[in-house]
Image (cartoon, rainbow, N blue to C red):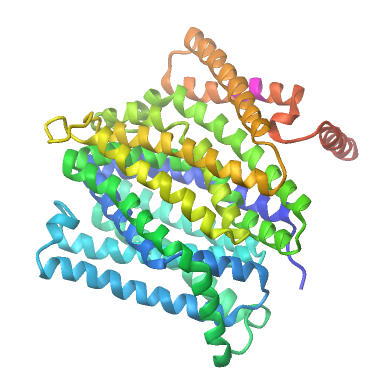
Amino acid sequence: MNTDSVIKRYSITLFVNIAKVFTGLVNATIVPNSLGVSNYGNFNFLLRTFKAIQTFLTLSTNSAFFTYSSKNKKSTNAFIVFFGWAIVQLIIILLIIFGSIIFGFKGKLFPDQINIFIILIGILQWVNYIGSISIQFGETKAESVYVQKINLLSSLITTALNVILFLFDILNLNTFIIVNYIGSLVIISFNYYYFLIKRKQDYFDRYNPEKTKETISYFVQFCTPLIVYGIFGFISNIFDRWFLQITDGSVQQGYFSISFRWISIVMIFTTSIISIFWREVSFAYNKKNIEQVNKIYFKSLKPIYLLSIFSAIVVYMNSEKIIKLFLHEDYYGAISVLKIMAFLPAFSAISQINSTFFYAVEKVKLHRNISIITMILGVLLTYVLVAPTTLIIPGFSLGSNGIAIKMIVISIILSTIQSFYILKMIKSSLSQWIHFQFLVLLFLVSAGVLTNVIIDMFILNTLLSIISFVIIYTTISGGILFIKPQLAGISNEEFIYYKNQFVRYFQNHK
């Protein structure tokens, strides 16, 4: 059975994620304004808390499953073992929720939260997880075109429902939660039909009970080194939001949440390639083709880094305008948070690609050790930056700004350490990679500053200035890339080839 090419899979994934930028902009405007800072903060606090719990409970079985599924066309036993454990995770989540309510420690685990919302959002996170897993399963089978169409359909449906509820003035926390359920259930339903009914013969064979022990052994071998990593990951993931909630409350939680929401929109370029990158690296490394692995690594990472820096500068230069244009004044406290977090996608992109690389080549122990070190540093840094000055061990009391600073610092440290080890594996130079990063940053920051000077001189209207900034900045940056295509990871030979293809296409279609 033929599969779609890497270019076609990446193109459709990128197209869908670009389309989701526009739906994301709509949702990032109407949802926070409708819910208010406090409710928006509480929703995200609970969702992130349960995501941390969910991540811990997976015990990295999702990484093992994706790696296995990428290397094997049919993976029935692994599929059953993995999703069986997912059901167990839901049961544990429900036990945690009802246990906290019945035995009276809800206030410690979920400060200032209402029971019904704890239950609904806890289950919602699990449903979101299953939806996400079903998409990634399709990616491991090179079925990006299909699963990304469903991904887009879900996004369009949820956005349309949010807009309708907003127009009728009934978009609130209750209805927003319902819309989120609908979005994930659309993905699950369509993917269930496609993979487990329509294409069952292509990706599944008869379940073999005799191989169950062997399959479980694979999961145990893959995941055991990551159990300690999972514990530290859980503490790290849950501590930021929990500590911010008990020290500064839901308003600061809201500032951080809306900033993270906008930054998440910028991260489309990374999410577009992750699953495809995972499969291709795993496939090439399994054949011991280090040269091909090197090529895949840099061909994926360099353009993503460039696009992330490009987007980061757009957000940084327009942070105040974005918040004041799209959100009411209750959110103005988020301006400084958004400015700090603007560059997070660039360094986060590197660490995400690197983490995926470690999983794809099954170097999970090394990934674990690096991550644990940075997690410990992250928790300590969160305390120092967020803790009130009145505590026995005082901090800087920076609230959501402190969490933003911590995320930037840790991302830089993590990505640098990861890159050091990966580049040794693929026989490449760390100094050359750092030099590349610096050059991209220098050129694009210079272009951003120049664009900002032009905009401030001639344009006063807020919306028009943002649009003009994007157009002028894109033009200047495009000119730089035309002169120096290496900044996008394109060699001179490749650039000439692409240029000739472009010219030939238009000559043939005159």
Left or right placement of residue 47 versus residue 19 in this view: left
Q: Does the magenta stretch include residue 474?
A: yes
Residue found at x 63% / y 26%: 440
Where residue 170 appears, x then y in whole percent?
25, 51
Left or right placement of residue 361 versus residue 45 in this view: right
Do we see residue 268 in this rendering?
Answer: yes
Q: Quadrant of residue 141?
A: bottom right
In this view, the residue farthest toward the left is 104
Closest to the observer, 357 or 330: 357
Where residue 404 appears, x then y in whole percent?
35, 35
Query: Which residue range is magenta in the image?
Result: 473-477
In the depicted structure, whether residue 173 falls above or below residue 224: above
Do we see residue 18 in this rendering?
Answer: no
Left or right placement of residue 379 versus residue 447 in this view: left
Q: Quadrant of residue 503?
A: top right
Q: In which quadrant is the C terminus drawn?
A: top right
Where residue 218 appears, x then y in whole percent?
55, 75
Q: In which quadrant is the N terminus drawn?
A: bottom right
Where residue 374 appears, x then y in whole percent?
42, 44
Closest to the observer, 480 or 190: 480
Q: Does the magenta stretch include residue 330?
A: no
Residue found at x 46% / y 22%: 317
Disc count in the image?
0
Is most of the magenta stretch helix, strand or loop?
helix
Closest to the observer, 19 or 53: 53
Residue found at x 56% / y 42%: 350
Q: Quadrant of residue 73?
A: bottom right
